[in-house]
Image (tube, rainbow, N blue to C red):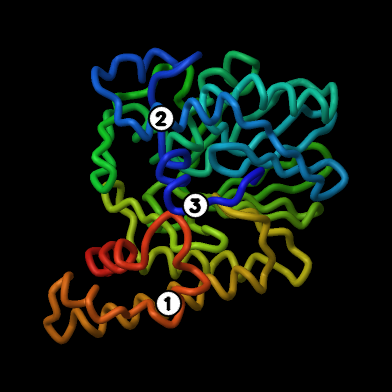
């Protein structure tokens, strides 16, 4: 990303969606948007899109929202995730700089608005929207994220995926094979991976936060064991040279994903052991079960104590 993510900036930018310049109608309907929502849209409107070439026709796009990946070619552009509505002009400009290929398909890694808020604007620019069935369900109905005290109305028709799948799906655009696969509930119940075989690029969405403790959305089925399982599944898909795109944070590889998986499993096991002995959530937090990992993972969006609380509630 253009600037490193820390806990304060991520809560302000990464998990946001509300009214600002170019805000879609579904968010303007909210009478009282949280401050972090407004700040996130404002940041997205001002943050340039950084483009990094990953393969001959596959690119990493990074801005204020979740990490995006674009594929170009004669079959049309594929884009993974859409960031915020206020980032759409910059996204379209970045895509235009890559090639003159037409818009084709926008794939959502999951339903969260820092990955889908730009859906409506990109659909209007010619992209059809593809996602897991649960992403369509959640965007079609009001949702809440309790940890951040956010209540979101249903998205408009133009932001909702028109094409969905329930388990796996294979596409073959632009000279590559792309496998889409649903993870069991992990970050949410709508998470998918997107694997470009020829380009050797794997997008893990928000099942992978590279460099800091991940947010797990309990309100939409997220849980720590699902995160452990998702990272293990991603490891089986990755080879030694695979470029692994996290939902947030810098580009990763198999070694960094392995470290992330080991951290998740280690924290899960320590917290589960405390819970089994009868420790309350606050007692488990006080035991500092993440202490061995805090120097590496504890300087991001969630404090160690916040992360332990989520793990405790979902283990």
Which class describes the residues within 10 Å of circle 2: few (<14), some (14-19), or many (20+)? many
Element type at mark 3: helix
To which residue does mark 1 refer? 265
Mark 1 or mark 2: whose residue is earlier in sequence: 2
Element type at mark 2: loop
Q: Is residue 121 left or right of residue 173?
A: left
Mark 3 or mark 1: whose residue is earlier in sequence: 3
To which residue does mark 2 refer? 17
Residue at horizontal 42%, vertical 17%? 157
Q: Are marks 3 and 2 in contact (CB under 8 Å)?
A: no
Q: In terms of depth relative to the viewer, which is nearer, 63 or 228?
A: 63
Observer able to see residue 133: no
Which class describes the residues within 10 Å of circle 1: few (<14), some (14-19), or many (20+)? some
Q: Are marks 1 and 2 in contact (CB under 8 Å)?
A: no
Q: In terms of depth relative to the viewer, which is nearer, 223 or 167?
A: 223
Quadrant location of residue 308? bottom left
Mark 3 or mark 2: whose residue is earlier in sequence: 2
Residue 226: percent from the left, percent from the top? 39, 64
Residue at horizontal 48%, vertical 36%? 114
Instruction: State how far apart marks 3 and 1 are (Cα).
Output: 17 Å
To which residue does mark 3 refer? 206
Quadrant occupied by the C terminus: bottom left
Instruction: State how far apart marks 1 and 2 are (Cα).
Output: 31 Å
Quadrant location of residue 256? bottom right
């Amino acid at each position: 990303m253009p600037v490193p993510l820390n806990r304060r900036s991520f809560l302000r930018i990464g998990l946001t969606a509300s009214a600002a310049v170019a805000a879609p109608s579904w968010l303007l309907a909210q009478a009282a948007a949280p401050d972090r929502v407004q700040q996130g849209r404002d940041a997205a409107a001002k943050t340039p899109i950084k483009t990094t070439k990953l393969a001959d026709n596959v690119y990493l796009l990074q801005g204020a929202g979740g990490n995006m990946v674009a594929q170009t070619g004669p079959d049309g552009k594929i884009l993974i995730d859409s960031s915020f509505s206020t980032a759409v002009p910059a996204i379209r400009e970045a895509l235009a700089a890559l090639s003159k290929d037409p818009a084709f398909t926008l794939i959502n890694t999951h339903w969260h608005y820092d990955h889908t808020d730009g859906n409506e604007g990109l659909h209007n620019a010619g992209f059809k929207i593809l996602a897991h069935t649960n992403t369509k369900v959640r965007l079609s109905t009001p949702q809440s994220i309790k940890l951040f005290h956010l209540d979101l109305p249903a998205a408009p028709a133009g932001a909702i995926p028109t094409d969905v799948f329930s388990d796996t799906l294979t596409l073959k655009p632009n000279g590559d094979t792309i496998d889409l696969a649903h993870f069991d509930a992990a970050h949410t119940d709508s998470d998918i991976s997107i694997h470009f075989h020829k380009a050797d690029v794997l997008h893990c969405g928000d099942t992978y936060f590279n460099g800091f403790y991940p947010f797990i959305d309990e309100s939409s089925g997220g849980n720590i064991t699902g995160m452990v399982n998702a990272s293990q599944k991603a490891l089986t898909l990755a080879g030694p040279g695979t470029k692994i795109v996290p939902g947030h944070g810098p580009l990763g590889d198999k070694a960094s994903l392995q470290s992330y998986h080991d951290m998740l499993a280690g924290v899960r096991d320590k917290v589960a052991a405390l819970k089994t002995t009868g420790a309350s959530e606050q007692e488990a937090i006080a035991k500092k079960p993440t202490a061995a990992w805090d120097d590496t993972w504890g300087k991001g969006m969630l404090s160690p104590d916040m992360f332990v609380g989520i793990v405790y509630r979902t283990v």
